Amino acid sequence: MSLTPGGRTDDPRSDKLVAERIAPPPHPGDKTGSKITTASLRELKLGHEPITCLTAYDYATARLVDEAGIEMVLVGDSLAQTMLGYENTLSVTMDEMLHHVKAVRRGVKRALLLADMPYGSYQLNESEALRNATRFVKEGGAEVVKIEGGEKRSDLIRRIIEAEIPVAGHIGLTPQSVNVMGGYKVQGKNLAAVEQLMRDAVALDRAGVACMVLEGIPREVAAMITAEVSTPTIGIGAGPDCDGQVLVFHDLVNLTFATPAKFVRHYGDAGAMISDAAGAFREDVKSAKYPSDEESYHLPKETKTGLDTVLARKRTMRG
């Protein structure tokens, strides 16, 4: 018998706990509970039903996001900053990404699970890219891998898809190109750049991507791309005309320490909640208010009686 987080006594003989492990709670955000697949995304686009996507990097967050009915869960390389404290996404490794993908896989039952291919995992050569994409599927349980870049990545993307691995594209502001772009800047602001974005989108569409992320581009351009391609578009800083929207979970709940981008909307303030909870805990411990007697375990009555007897004898012998 062991204690699990939350102070629950985790006894494998408990029918209730076994049932909880076998049958996770229903997803309140979805009445059918049907598994989301790459085909589901196409159906949602055709039906003009907006697609939702959030990042997740650990079991608990992934489970909560999945149970909320979110259609796509992305283990983004943004975990470099949100979870590991790196300056940008360039430093995160395949092994670090896989560690988090595995954790998220355990929490996701219904949503489609995407994993970011980190910088250096697909740029060197095709063989290395195929090997790393395969690791995400075989070891991590990912259902789709995401690759940044448009026309220049289309041949590689076709090859990965031929290996039976679905791919999500990503164009516009591509964070792994931050040094080339000279920072995180909105893309597609002149006619030549718009034309290149359209070529990138069409190239990804023809390559057969399961979806494509449009990041940091003008709303008008995102609307043009969405109307032009058959694959679902997922916007982040690309306006409301995309087929779906994605946000970084830590931005969603105000758990980041940087100034938020223009497109970020806070739907909760977990940062303040965690700070307040930690401060209250410290105060209660310092003032001896935690733990209380009710929050403490006690000896069985007969054991307590026996122990008191032993202690009384020891006190007598000392006297």
Image (spheres, helix red, strand yellow):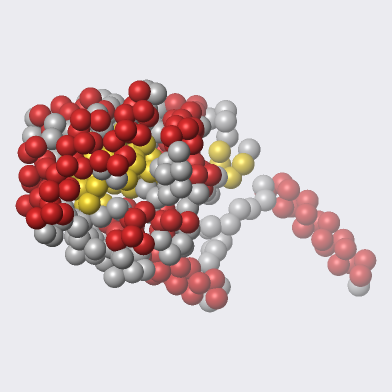
Instruction: State the image coordinates of residue 81 (x, y, percent, origin top left).
Output: 41, 60
Question: Does residue 52 show up?
Answer: no
Instruction: State the image coordinates of residue 136 (x, y, percent, origin top left).
Output: 45, 35
Q: Quadrant of the N terminus?
A: top right
Query: In the image, 95: left or right of 222?
Result: right
Q: Nearer the viewer, residue 234 or 273?
A: 234
Question: Quadrant of residue 75 in the image?
Answer: top left
Q: Nearer the viewer, residue 20 or 272?
A: 272
Q: Farthest residue in the front direction?
A: 192
Question: Does residue 134 show up?
Answer: yes
Instruction: State the image coordinates of residue 205 (x, y, percent, origin top left).
Output: 20, 33
Query: In the image, 90: left or right of 268?
Result: right
Q: Residue at x 22, y 51 (%)?
A: 172
Q: Residue at x 45, y 68 (%)?
A: 278
Query: In the image, 130: left or right of 286?
Result: left
* Residue 259 in the image: above or below residue 35: below
Query: In the image, 283: left or right of 25?
Result: right
Instruction: State the image coordinates of residue 138 (x, y, percent, origin top left).
Output: 48, 28
Q: Please tell me how many numbered marks the rendered image carries.
A: 0
Q: Nearer the viewer, residue 65 or 196?
A: 196
Q: Residue at x 37, y 29 (%)?
A: 160
* Residue 247 in the image: above or below residue 281: above
Q: Quadrant of the C terminus?
A: bottom right
